[in-house]
Image (cartoon, coloured by chain):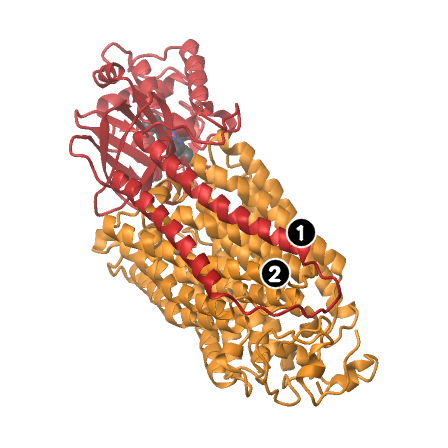
Amino acid sequence: MDNVETNNGGQQEQELNYLNNGHSVRSWLLTRDHKRIALLYVLSVSFFFLVGGIYAGLLRVELLTPQSDLFEAATYNRIFTAHGVIMIFLFLIPAIPATLGNFFVPLLIGAKDLAFPRINLLSWYLYMGGAGLAVWALMQGGVDTGWTFYAPYSTTFSNSYVVMTGLGAFVVGFSSILTGLNFIVTIHTMRAPGMTWFRLPLMIWSHYATSLIMILGTPVVAITIVLLALERIARVGIFDPSIGGDPILFQHLFWFYSHPAVYVMILPAMGVMSELVANFSRKRVFGYEFVAFSSIAIAVIGFLVWGHHLFVSGQSFYAGMVFSILTMIVAVPSAVKVFNWTATLYQGSLSFDTPMIYAYGFLGLFLVGGLTGLFLGTAGMDIHLSDTYFIVSHFHFVMVGGTVMGYLGGIHYWWSKMTGRHYSEFWGKISAMLVFIGFNLTFFPQFILGYLGMPRRYASYPEEFQVLNIFSTLGASVLGVGYGLPVIYLTYSFFFGKKADDNPWKLPGLEWRTSSPPPTENFKETPIVTWEAYDFSEDNGIEIERTPETEVQPSS
Amino acid sequence: MFMQSENIPLFPEQASTFAWQVDYLFFYITAICLFFGLGVVLVVLAFAYKYKEQKKFASPRNIHGSLVLEFTWTAIPFVLAMSIFVLGTIVFHNLYSMPQDATEIFVVGKQWMWKFQHGTGQREINELHVPVGRKIKLTMTTEDVIHDVYIPAFRTKADVVPGRFTYLWFEATKPGKYRLFCAEYCGLNHSGMGGWVYVMEQKDFDSWLSGTDADKTPVQAGEDLFNNKLGCASCHAGGDTQRGAKLEGIFGKEVKLVGGNTAQRDEQYLRNSILNPGGQVVEGYQPIMPTFKGQVTEEQLVSLVAYIRSLSPDAASAPSTGSGNGTGTETESEDKAGDDQGDK
Ligand SMILES: [Cu+2]
Ligand SMILES: [Cu+2]
């Protein structure tokens, strides 16, 4: 747009953008710019991904042999709990919404910022505060309840820092509520002129659906944690039957949030996926309305399926049946999305740039993750598979295969917009492929282990399971390299990478019509939207056709 | 069965009337998954090949969508999902509804052991003997946290929940020895809370039921209790990798306890170790040994103590209760315990 003139040669004097608009620590820590807050989040969630990943590595090494040799059972139990708590609460839930969502929700709809910039900053501080509590609990000795905190073990029997960790999750939960609230208000009230609901990029629809879950579901887990603490500290009988409570009640409350939380993790990744598929096929997403509404359908139906976690808990037969059928139904909108993405490729002009490799990877892993969900949603089948490595593998495929692929795909896709620099395509592709291969090597053996009957959360296990566990650990080391590489080449790119154009791929989205990196106020002029989402209809570049006031086309 | 190789099992044994039902359900769902999964992958690969960009930044024809397609690919998965649901619910129903004519066995879980009691009064720990071809119903509860009885070869499991009874039934189809796991995380020694289900021909089962220890010496009886009936060997045998303290050659020696005290390992000490292990935890070990208070009779205690003493053949001669049986028994029993551990 209007900044094009200055950016065209690339070598003119530095233009003011959100990155160089203030360099002091203060200007970062007290920023109200959603883009800076997003970067704070990128750093913090990536850090916790690393920490959680180190815990995962320790688990995999320990599982090389059947006995406990590296750690005792007590330590092992604390490590898998730490891995779960960190990955779920500190990485997966905020991973995409708080980073890419924070950065791009306003940019994609043509807004200057989120509706409540201060609340946005507050949410980051809450996240850091909660994370601090959890880390503090870890350093005191950790928790050994598993990230699920099942009562009465957590309330009466465990001698670990349950309340402190719970408090951490509680506080982090508020950060997620505030983020959701901010998104909803922003999407309702701050769309650029002409940006109607059905012109919104699908990333926005999926973030809207995610936000609904965040604000409706998170308070329930917050209350559950409070009840847990009440029972643990004050011995108020809520869950422990020896003082009058009901342990199954805990599971209902816990999963009422924690199942939808899975969609908090996967829906934003699906949003990224829609962007990638459309933009790298250079076509509108096939069946836009269906993809958009399937996000809402997933969010709504997703609230009604939590009982599939209780098929073996002594829940009644009819309850099991109802939860089973609802779980089958919630699978359908996800399938619809997959078919629509596939159809989008039809007659497209497909490129194989790094983000698109991640998109293909997402499709592969999410297919496996989603389809294996059918086994677990089938009550008669789940009896055998529940609490085995089959489920461990399933949810890693969905949450890690899906969310992390989406996260990395999105980071690569928007990297030039966020930093104004290019990363190395070569290393990008290598690491995307390593992640895909390593992921499958790690988790496929676990499906077999699960069907054979290896229970999860076992510090030591029978010898007949060893060979498959060795394969899994080998795969995990490939995966580790795949995840490690981007940290290196992206950091390098941030400081030394080749300067990027405003719109290196010639894409139509609003975010590509401002400079890279964008100015603090995002758009020099409020954009006026006259086109559908993903409208590639002109051959010769999008800006000229779509924004008549711009005369100069940035050269690549 | 199929896909089975010597050392790397790829498919679990089928040993109950549920096994084939669950496995067929598994194959059915797998077939549907392969159909969709491979279908999508093939189409994506074909498109990726066919529509690879010819020219950078082209603008291909825009296609908005197709109601017919949307309807088709909503309806087909929906119908198939419902078929899975129906079949799954039938299997679920079979697993869930308890037969009237089953033999009942009571199960109590506690951190970290399983206690079984047969209708005829026999008690077992971490082991369950059942006859082949008879319906068995487990009526279960727990003394502390939630546990879960899981027998993969039977394709069934159920949580064991404090404060209520839960039920599980099965009919074994093949004599043999099958793993029993605790599948609900229950704390420190969760992964050690397992054992075996022995499926026996009816006549073997009957003789097992009526088996008596009358003709055994205390040491032999103790050895049997230690290795088989009470499951001590699951922690106290296995050489370098065992979780429990080493018991060989300890009798009569001093022991350092957690908390700084020391104690003399005499009969009274051994007895306390069994009845109240938490009260005197040996330094260097986790306090995972469960109490056996109320589960062993005085008579059995005497036998256990005699057996443990016999593991220290050169301990200074100690008072009364049947002298150690000497080295022979000791090595023998150790070997046996070792075998039990390594067994499949
Ligand atoms: Cu769920
Ligand atoms: Cu357990």
- Look at mark 1 in the image and give the residue it sits on: A433
Image position of A8 (left or right of A482): right
Q: Nearer the viewer, residue A377 or A309?
A: A377
Image position of A487 (left or right of A443): right
Q: Could you give the CA–CA distance between mark 1 and mark 2, rounded to whole angstroms?
A: 20 Å
Q: Amino acid at mark 1?
A: Met
Q: Chain of mark 2?
A: A
Q: Residue A478 at x, y = what percent?
A: 65, 46
Q: Is residue A58 above or below residue A505?
A: above
- Look at mark 2 in the image and give the residue it sits on: A345
Circle 1 — which element? helix
Circle 2 — which element? helix
Q: Residue at x 72, y 69 (%)?
A: B57
Q: Residue A65 at x, y = what percent?
A: 55, 34
Q: Nearer the viewer, residue A554 or A62?
A: A554
Q: Residues within 10 Å of mark 1 (few under 14, many from 20)?
A: some
User: What number is the disc on residue B15?
Assistant: none
Q: Nearer the viewer, residue B265 or B131?
A: B131
